[in-house]
């Protein structure tokens, strides 16, 4: 009986020690590097940003930005605009990340911090940008239709299809 006790105590000690050691190794692995993640969520009907003539998002969509250890932003997402062309939106629409205050200008989403006009609606968005997460903090994602571009002094005509603030999903500022 005493031997069994002693053995199980020994086993418990060894077990406790080894889990502590591997937990430390795990913590190190998980904490450095920490990859910051932000995203824009477009919910149909949401009006989280005020702009003249804008009465809510007309589609559902998601854009996610993950900062990889070499400071590149990996961008993924999907913009679900039904009935829209499934080819790059360049020339007809803008998919931009930009200063939110541009929502109230004649060219919402301009100038872009990130330009995704070579991506398509209705297809997976998978690309990258040579930026860090801090470049888009507090900015907004825009999907804008361009009716007409600048022609001399005639201003462009553009309409916001959707605008969503960049929100933090994983914040690494306190882990380093
Ligand atoms: C960073 O890594 C990505 C893949 O994760 C790669 O495509 C890109 O070229 C790298 N950039 C630099 C500057 O090394
Ligand atoms: C956005 O633009 C406004 C007006 O130009 C400016 O005051 C503000 O600093 C800008 N914000 C960022 C995060 O660049
Ligand atoms: C991104 O942020 C860095 C550091 O603040 C800055 O030097 C760089 O100019 C920014 N890039 C863009 C495209 O805004």
Image (spheres, rainbow, N blue to C red):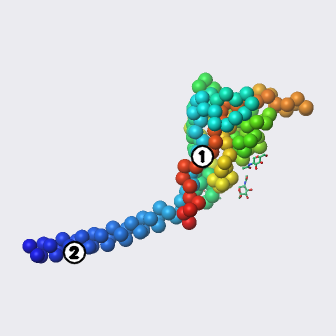
Cβ of mark 1 under 8 Å from ligand 2: the answer is no
Q: Which mark is residue 32?
A: none
Residue found at the far right of this picture: 153
In the image, residue 147 above or below residue 66: above
Label 2 neighbourhood size at 10 Å, few (<14), some (14-19), many (20+)?
few
Residue 86: quadrant of the picture: top right
Where's residue 144, x and y in %?
71, 33
Between the C-alphas of marks 1 and 2, the distance is 50 Å
Cβ of mark 2 under 8 Å from ligand 1: the answer is no
Residue at point 63%, 58% (across, down): 71
Quarter of the picture holding the C terminus? bottom right
N-terminal of the pair, mark 1 or mark 2, is 2
Label 1 neighbourhood size at 10 Å, few (<14), some (14-19), many (20+)?
some
In the image, residue 76 above or below residue 149: below
Residue at point 56%, 62% (across, down): 174
Q: Which mark is residue 10?
A: 2
Residue found at the far left of this picture: 1
Quarter of the picture holding the N terminus? bottom left
Residue 93 is at least partly visible in this image = no
| Element type where label 2 sits in the image | helix
Residue at point 18%, 71% (across, down): 8
Residue at point 73%, 27% (across, down): 53
Where's residue 137, x and y in %?
65, 50
Residue position for label 1:
167
Where's residue 139, x and y in %?
68, 46
In the image, residue 92 above or below residue 117: above
| Element type where label 1 sits in the image | strand
**Picture quarter with ligand 3:** bottom right
């Amino acid at each position: 009986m005493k031997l069994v006790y002693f053995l199980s105590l020994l086993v418990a000690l060894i077990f406790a020690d080894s889990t502590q050691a591997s937990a430390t190794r795990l913590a190190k692995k998980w904490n450095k590097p920490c990859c910051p993640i932000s995203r824009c969520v477009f919910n149909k009907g949401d009006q989280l940003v005020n702009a003249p003539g804008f009465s809510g998002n007309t589609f559902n969509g998601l854009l996610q930005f993950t900062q990889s250890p070499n400071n590149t932003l990996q961008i993924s997402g999907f913009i679900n605009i039904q009935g829209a062309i499934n080819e790059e939106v360049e020339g007809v629409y803008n998919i931009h990340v930009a200063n939110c205050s541009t929502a109230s200008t004649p060219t919402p989403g301009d100038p872009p911090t990130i330009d995704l006009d070579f991506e398509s609606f209705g297809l997976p968005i998978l690309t990258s940008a040579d930026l860090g997460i801090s470049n888009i903090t507090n900015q907004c994602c825009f999907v804008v239709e361009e009716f007409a571009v600048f022609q001399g002094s005639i201003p462009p005509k553009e309409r916001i299809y959707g605008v969503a603030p960049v929100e933090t999903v994983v914040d690494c500022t306190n882990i380093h």
